[in-house]
Amino acid sequence: MNLFGSGCDTPSMGIRAGVRGEQMLGVSVPQIGDEEIAEVVDAIRSGWVTSGPRVSELQHRLADYLGVPFVRCLNSCTASLSLALYVSGVGLGDEVLVPALTFASCANVVVHRGAKPVFVDTDPETGLIDLADAEAKVTPATRAIMPVHLAGHPVDLDAVEALCARHGIEVVEDAAHAIGASWRGRRIGSHGDLTAFSFHATKNITTFEGGALALWDEATAERVGRLALNGITRSSWARHGDADAAGYDVPEPGYKLAMHDVAAAVGIHQLPRLDGWIDQRRDLADLYDARLAGLPLELPPRAPAHARHAHHLYIVRVARNAPVGRDGVAAALRARNIGTSVHFRALHLHSWYREHSGLAPRDLPAAADWSARALTLPLFPAMTADDVEAVGCALEDAFS
Ligand SMILES: *Cc1c(COP(=O)(O)O)cnc(C)c1O
């Protein structure tokens, strides 16, 4: 029932005309406080702006927060996934099980290792990787699986662990959406051997661009740190002030993927606020659930009781019998200055992967269906109940 009658577009209602006057309501807006700005200035003034003490501090704080012994900060989640595959030994001719419904970088990093991403269909209720389909696609060439905690909703890690044990394959978790989420009382990042996080500007915490790999094995952590700095055994920060300033070796060629201290300066002050932000995100998601009930939308599923959802994204699906399709709804919201996004258009529908996988859209029917109907609504901690109301009104009008 529409409590506002046809008054949803009454200009006197302020928020209902254009949201926040002329200002666009973005899908995701980073929260940058005075502490972050002051720390960035301090980092720049310190004279040490490349990978150094602030990166090291952020790594320790993240390890503490996640409950893992080691974290290596890198310049993106993409870099973290790439090095995770590298240290897992994924190479030429191997296959990696990747959900079709994810961001491009998940499959790109597999291709760049000379391996083949094998796309897995989507659980139609949750949007997460369909683990029965994953298991059906295991072959003798399968080396690893890359579950993605889409929207911050944890994948069933008990089932992932059992699948990996049955087939002797590695797991590389993509937790780009899931910092702060947990599964059976332990944070996402502390279950698998290798978990990648993103601190891109749109994610739950940010270093603007950045990411991290959480690990259990010390030798692997050292190797990842080295591979991020061209393969040299001692970083310039470690050598700084040494008599033997040229003293390093190159045991294997690396890449250039390290985080720098100015970025870490931002992350150091984001992390302590993460849990409060997730609570705010959860409250906003609850408001959306209540406001959108009754509209021709399928609302996001709840995480099981033994898990904590990180509420990174609020993804609805436009009902099949709705009077307007997803693109029409997105356009109607755009006309009200409300941003939306799509998470995701499945990878087998993108031209390179369509050609190289040989998959038709219907070969992964649930992923194709989700791609056609999913719409991500604005969700970030500084949003207000009025913003949720404005989005609710705009949706109501779009369907009426
Ligand atoms: C954002 C994102 C990435 C990539 O993160 P970057 O830090 O930008 O490299 C990977 N996977 C998923 C699911 C994402 O949403």
Image: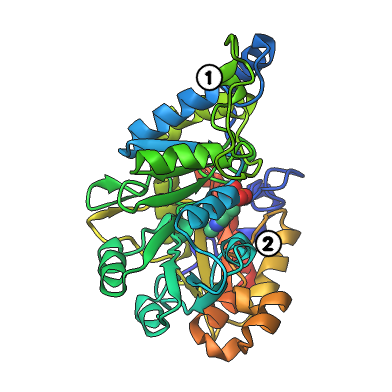
Q: SS at mark 1?
A: helix
Q: Nearer the viewer, residue 127 or 250?
A: 250
Q: Nearer the viewer, residue 374 or 157?
A: 157
- Residue 42: image x %, image y %? 63, 12
In the rendered image, the vertical position of residue 291 relative to residue 273, given as above or below:
below
Q: Quadrant of the C terminus?
A: bottom right
Q: Amino acid at mark 1?
A: Pro
Q: Residues within 10 Å of mark 2 (few under 14, many from 20)?
A: many
In the rendered image, the vertical position of residue 11 relative to residue 226, given as above or below:
below
Q: How far apart are the two marked residues, 2 and 1, measured between alpha carbons?
A: 45 Å
Residue labelled 1 has its Cβ within 8 Å of some atom of ligand 1: no
In the rendered image, the vertical position of residue 43 relative to residue 90, given as above or below:
above
Q: Residue at x 40, y 80 (%)?
A: 138
The circle drawn on residue 333 is 2
The chosen color scheme is rainbow
Q: Nearer the viewer, residue 293 or 197?
A: 197
In the rendered image, the vertical position of residue 5 relative to residue 28, given as above or below:
below
- Residue 128: image x %, image y %? 43, 69
In the displayed structure image, the side of residue 192 where residue 99 appears, left or right: right
- Residue 369: image x %, image y %? 55, 82
Q: Is residue 34 visible?
A: no
Could you tell me how many numbered marks the image carries? 2
The circle drawn on residue 53 is 1
Q: Is residue 273 visible?
A: yes
